[in-house]
Each structure stands twice: as structure tokens, then as C-alpha cells.
Amino acid sequence: MDVYAPPYQTTDDITVLVAEICEEIERISVLQKDHITPKHKKENLICTIHSTLAIENNSLSMSQVTAICEGKRVLGNPVEVREVKNTYDAYKLLPELNPLDVDSLLKVHSLMMAGLIPDNGKFRSQGVGVFNGEKIIHMAPPAALVPSQVHNLISWYKESNLHPLIKSAVFHYEFEFIHPFADGNGRVGRMWHTLLLGKWKEPFYWLPIDALILSRRQEYYSAFNQANNTADSACFVELLLEIIRDTLKRFC
């Protein structure tokens, strides 16, 4: 049987970005011991939750999201409030999750989409597409292929010799390409990217990478679309690495 190999070709810019990120993360790892407090980490986590849901068009403000995460009652769309509660509960599990375990992936989807869709915690059974607003940018593979494709992607990650920064970004792209769930793929995929990075270097658990993805949302979708068209995820990987580098410089 052929070994699964995601379509990816490295570039000089990617090599430079990896070096820059490694330098920044070492600086932060030293800084964290004395200057980065639990309060700072929680604020960044709430920023992540607000951002990842805003990417999915949740309209609640940062202050409303903060209040919900603190257990306060908030006037707002009940569905959007539920999205925040679910996402906060899911992110609190980050350090104990195994990113290379399918059951953990299904558990997080079940928690994140509880009360929002009927088939939370299950792979999709029908065809779906990726939309940017009302414009479809990708038709996902047939539902029958999803379980094997997810298992193959995880097996590839375990065996790949690529740098964790690169292969976690490739995983992010491939996860969104497979689009394994009926809904919630974007928020779960971004959380899983964070989880993969956090297993490599602990500060990534609380760095709000999604805040900069939100600010570059159109580029994010465009890079995904370009990767589909060229059958090479390098452009998507490069954008994510730029965002990670800039997040490290902005929030630390």
C-alpha cells in the first residue's frame, strides 16, 4: 500500500520563518518562567476563543466572551452564547488531549458542537463544502472516505520527519481539506493545530494565533483555495508560519 503523503513542497521563505519562530519561542520559554502569569494566559485563551468563533461569524464582543468564560450571564444570541461555552470547555482540555488519537478528536468535536448540531462527535455522513461567506471554495471528499483519510493523516504526522511547525501547518490544511465533520471543522481544525504545537512547545497552548488569523481571514481562505488549485499546501503553510511569528512578537 502506498504511504500517504500530503501535497507539500518547502520554500526558502518557510525555512527562514521556521528559524525565526524557533528563536522567538526560545525567548518566550525563558520569559514565561518569570513574567507570564496565569492571568495573562487566561486572557490570551479568551482572545483565542473570541477570535476562532468570530472567524465563523459569531458576533459576540470580546467583553461578552470574557463574561461568559467567567460564568456570568450575557444577553445575546443563545446559539452564539452556547458556542462560546462549548469552545471554552473544549480548550480547557488542551493539555490532557492526545492530538494523534481519533477518539480525542471526536470527543472534542462532541463537546464543541454539543447542542449546536445533532451529529456532534461523529464523522459526517454526507457531502459538505468549505465556504468563504456565501462563496464555496472547496468541495470536500466523499463522506465514505473520511475515516480512512483522518487515520492516514494522523499516521503521516506520527511518521513524518518534517519540523513540527511545518507538519502541524500541513496537518491544519489537510484537516480542512478532508472536512471530516458536518459542521465545526474550522474551529476544531484551528484548535488541533494549537494542540499539535503545544505538544511541541508548551507556550503555544495559550498563544492566541487565531486572533491574527481573524485579522487576515481573507488571506487565510485565499491561501487555502490556492493550495487546492495547485495541489501544494506550501502557500498555506507559509501564511500560517507568518501568523505564528507575528503572534509571538505581538503577544509576548
Image: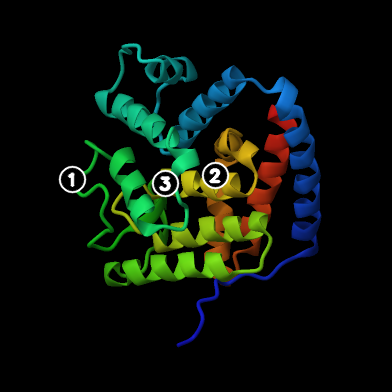
Q: Look at label 1 and name its amino acid.
A: Pro
The numbered disc on residue 188 is 3
Q: Quadrant of the C terminus?
A: top right
Q: Earlier in the sequence, mark 3 or mark 1?
A: 1
Disc 1 versus disc 2: distance between alpha carbons? Answer: 26 Å
Under circle 1, the secondary element is: loop
Q: Look at label 2 and name its amino acid.
A: Thr
- What percent of the width, then of the height, locates residue 222? 56, 53
Q: Residue at x 49, y 46 (%)?
A: 190
Crowding at dot 1, Cα within 10 Å, few <14 / some 14-19 / many 20+, comes out as few
Q: Residue at x 33, y 13 (%)?
A: 74
Q: Is residue 162 positioned above or below 21 on the image?
A: below
Q: Looking at the image, which is closer to me, 32 or 171? A: 32
Q: Is residue 125 positioned above or below 183 on the image?
A: below
The numbered disc on residue 194 is 2
Please give left or right for residue 223 compared with residue 81 in the image.
Answer: right
Under circle 3, the secondary element is: helix
Please give left or right for residue 82 compared with residue 58 in the image.
Answer: left
Q: Earlier in the sequence, mark 1 or mark 2?
A: 1
Please give left or right for residue 237 compared with residue 133 in the image.
Answer: right
Q: Looking at the image, which is closer to me, 139 or 102? A: 102
Q: Earlier in the sequence, mark 2 or mark 3?
A: 3
Q: Look at label 3 and name its amino acid.
A: Val
Q: Quadrant of residue 246?
A: top right
Q: Quadrant of the N terminus?
A: bottom left
- Which residue position is annotated with label 1? 118
